Image (cartoon, rainbow, N blue to C red):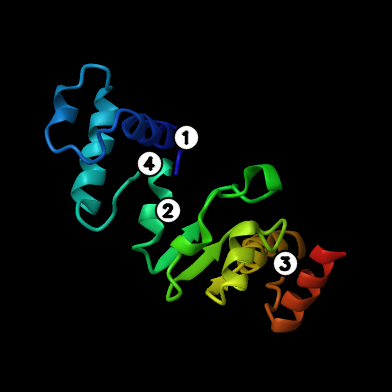
Amino acid sequence: MNNRLSKSIKRLEKLNLIKSKDKVEKHRDLSAYEVKVFRQLRDKYDKRVRVEKWSSLNEIVATCNNIINTTSLGMNDETAININPEAISEKALISDLVYTPLETNLLKIAKNRKIRFVDGLGMLIHQGVPGFEAWFGKTPLITEDLRELLNFLTKA
């Protein structure tokens, strides 16, 4: 997502216009680009995807079967996602794209509650493939042994 689009979406969220059907066109502080972004988001994701406030996280998580952390939250203890472990359904699948540390607070919650989870190491490995190809002219073989080695190295 480009920087301009990202800023526009954040601004629309802040102004609480993402869910609005008619207010956005009348809002004088929005640029033509922001109105265009809003309309595209509304048309594409209207009923399937909602933008919610962080303050509603525990209520929202309680209704989800798939929870994905795509932010940098969790990379250290100060930025751990503040979530009530009991709010997460036992049937949920939790994915955390953070790979340093490999076991984030969110994944510790999942592990302790015996909830299925996926860590960010797979993303790190697969992001490295194009760079490896560019530097060495060969496609690396992604194996379970490679994952175990990288998992070991992240703990060292």
Give percent across and percent down for residue 135: 75, 59
Kind of residue at badge 3: Gly
| Separation of residues labelled 1 and 2 (CA atoms) | 29 Å
Q: Which residue is mark 1?
A: 3
Q: Earlier in the sequence, mark 2 or mark 4?
A: 4
How would you rate the neighbour count of disc 3 (Cα within 10 Å): few for under 14, some for 14-19, many for 20 or more?
A: few
Q: Earlier in the sequence, mark 1 or mark 4?
A: 1
- Measuring 76% from the left and 65% from the top, which residue is drawn there? 136
Give percent across and percent down for residue 134: 69, 59
Kind of residue at badge 4: Lys
Circle 1 or circle 4, nearest the eye:
4
Q: Earlier in the sequence, mark 4 or mark 3?
A: 4
* Pointers 4 and 3 in contact (C-beta within 8 Å): no
| Separation of residues labelled 1 and 4 (CA atoms) | 21 Å
Q: Which residue is mark 2?
A: 58
Q: Nearer the viewer, residue 126 or 113?
A: 113
Q: Nearer the viewer, residue 65 or 151?
A: 65
| Separation of residues labelled 2 and 4 (CA atoms) | 11 Å
* Pointers 1 and 4 in contact (C-beta within 8 Å): no
Kind of residue at badge 1: Asn
Q: Quadrant of residue 8?
A: top left
- Residue 137: which disc? 3
Is 72 on the left or on the right of 92, as rendered?
Answer: right
Circle 1 or circle 3, nearest the eye:
1
SS for dot 4:
loop
- Residue 53: which disc? 4
| Separation of residues labelled 2 and 3 (CA atoms) | 47 Å
